[in-house]
Amino acid sequence: MKKFLINGFAILLTMGSLAACTNQDMGTVGGAALGGVAGNAITGGSTAGTVVGAVGGGLVGRAVSN
């Protein structure tokens, strides 16, 4: 139950902070999220693959939203 509450609070905090973002910020966050998921899936769950995917996705998302 405690883990559920902590995760719920983290989600609410994240959603609240994204409400004040610009389109460019949203593109960066969206790209990083998609890139992290793709990097994780491609490398079979490797941490390095997830991080590289998130960074790459964030850069592409920021460039596209410009």
Image: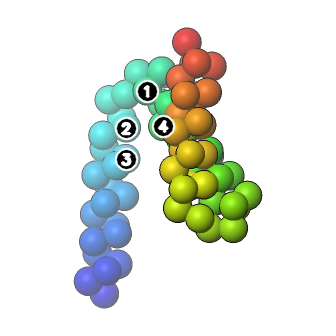
Picture residue at 31% right of the left edge, 60% below the top: 10
Find residue 46 and report its horizontal and vertical position in percent. Answer: 59, 65
Q: CA distance from mark 3 to mark 1?
A: 13 Å
Pointers 2 and 3 in contact (C-beta within 8 Å): yes
- Mark sitting on residue 25: 1
| Image side of residue 57 versus residue 23, left or right | right
Task: Classify 10 Å Cα crowding around label 3: few (below 14), some (14-19), many (20 and above).
Answer: few
Q: Is residue 10 above or below residue 30?
A: below
According to the picture, the residue beneath numbered tag 3 turns out to be 15
- Camera-side mark, 3 or 1: 1
Quarter of the N terminus within the rendering: bottom left
- Mark sitting on residue 18: 2
Name the quadrant containing residue 31.
top right
- Mark sitting on residue 29: 4
- The secondary element bearing badge 4 is classed as helix
Pointers 2 and 1 in contact (C-beta within 8 Å): yes
Pointers 3 and 1 in contact (C-beta within 8 Å): no
- Mark sitting on residue 44: none
The disc labelled 4 sits on which kind of residue? Val
Pointers 2 and 4 in contact (C-beta within 8 Å): yes
Q: How many marks?
A: 4
